[in-house]
Amino acid sequence: MARAGFVLADWSEKWFPDAYIFAIIAVVIVGLAALFMGRTPIQIGVDFGSHFWDLVPFAMQMAFVVISGYVVATSKPVNRLIVKLSAIPKTPKTAVAFVAFFAMVASLLSWGFSLIFSGILIREVSKRVKGVDYRAIGAAGYLGLGSIWALGLSSAPALLMTTKSSIPTSLYKISGTIPLTETIFTWQNLVMIIVLIVMSVTICYYSTPNADKAKTAEMAGINYGEGEDTKERTKAEKPGEWLEYSPILTFVIVSIGIVYVFNVINTKGPIAALDLNTYNFIFLMLGMLLHWTPRSFLNAAAKAIPATGGVLIQFPIYAGIFGVLMGSGLTELLMKFFLSISTQNTFPAIVGIYSAILGLFLPSGGGKFVVEAPYLLEAAKHLHVGLGWVVQVYNAAEALPNFINPFWMLPLMGIMGVKARDLAGFSILQLVFHLPVVIFMVWILAKTVPYIPAIF
């Protein structure tokens, strides 16, 4: 099975275009469908352009998930923690399983944090444990994005649906707001998280080659030795730089931030307060505190910004697709299609399969959700399926194509110095197990979820 994964990885690296190309192909497909529905090219252009900027606030929120996650993961206190953790595993199999576990747990806090944290942990573990297959451990570090990230606190769809100002008006008219108590903070979601972590770590352990058969980083010409990183300056050399290297301003702004967070929690409650804005705010304040000086924080933020390019460019395209779907009546047509092939019993499984397939072409949890949500949630209302559970079905299934689509691998690949094909073989092995288990869980657990009307 591992050999088959390598063949598929080679094929995808040769034939799969950039994620941006997938988004443009989606525009063409939706545009052609709109023409078939009777829209003129001018009307399609107006629909696309008039909605193009609808997701700017949401795109910025997603960009800050990346930035804040990177800033926290690269701070000195977190780096010291990573060094201590890296001394725990002693064999190649335990090292890969160890990285997989922490990658998945970290992704529950932030998918952006998970990628950077895992990449640094892999580097440190590879220095200490001899005979670790760099492909197996790299795929393990990516497991958070391929499995459970969207079931955690940085779930873009779940957080989007709690924030009225971030929900497109047309979607809000269908769903209203959906609190986190109906999505990520449910016992059904916890069951999925536990099952997927146990299964993934077990697969990592048993699929990792022994030291005598492993292809190590050294064999691939990758150097994780000491002294690779350029040391940053820690002291001011000019009077004008003094505040940049002093913690005084950090202390002031973080103190103000703490006051705000406590006020939001006291006013709304700890769960209702956790929308995208509050989540990003907390992570950003934590990053400032952990870096201690403004200069260290700014250096880390500057290194994180290139990783946000795909988000900033592609999210407006997703908003344009949403506009064409709404303007052409395709959302209503798709809603009727799902109603025609679904029952209350089968709807969750059908949504899961559909979302996983579409994720190959629109590799963005938040952006793709805005495209899918109008017709999926409208169909769910007709079938009396819990709207919050539909969001979680989407979350669980949307992560599956990440195992083979290289878009979200980029930050991890940059730290490890590898290519997508190096990780894809073992990732596809995980997908073989994840796909049936995820679809079964979203179907069977749906039977325990009550239908709650939309909240406006």
Image (cartoon, rainbow, N blue to C red):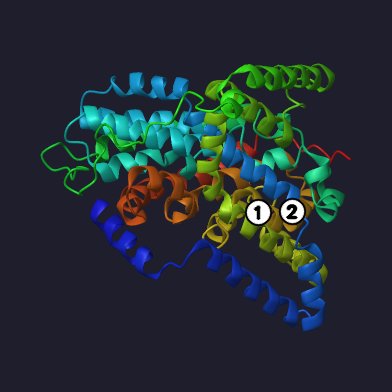
Work out which quarter of the rendered image holds the C terminus and state it: top right
Q: Can residue 431 be seen in the rendering of this structure?
A: yes
Q: Residue furthest left?
A: 212
Amino acid identity at mark 1: Gly
Residue 387 at x, y percent in the picture: 74, 43
Q: Nearer the viewer, mark 2 or mark 1?
A: 2
Residue 9 at x, y percent in the picture: 33, 59
For marks 2 and 1, give the CA distance. Answer: 8 Å
Q: Residue furthest right?
A: 456
Callout 2 crowding tier (Cα within 10 Å): few <14, some 14–19, many ≥20: many
Q: Is residue 36 above or below residue 268?
A: below
Q: Is residue 188 left or right of residue 436?
A: right
Q: Is residue 288 left or right of residue 57?
A: left
Depth check, front residue: 121 or 163 = 121
Q: Residue furthest front?
A: 239
The structure residue drawn at horizontal position 78% and vertical position 54%, both measured from the top left corner, is 378
What kind of element bears circle 2? loop
Residue pointed to by mark 1: 367
Q: Is residue 217 above or below residue 278?
A: below
Residue pointed to by mark 2: 55
Amino acid identity at mark 2: Leu
Dot 2 and dot 1 residues touching (CB under 8 Å): yes
Residue 51 at x, y percent in the picture: 79, 63
Residue 298 at x, y percent in the picture: 57, 35
Depth check, front residue: 154 or 447 = 154
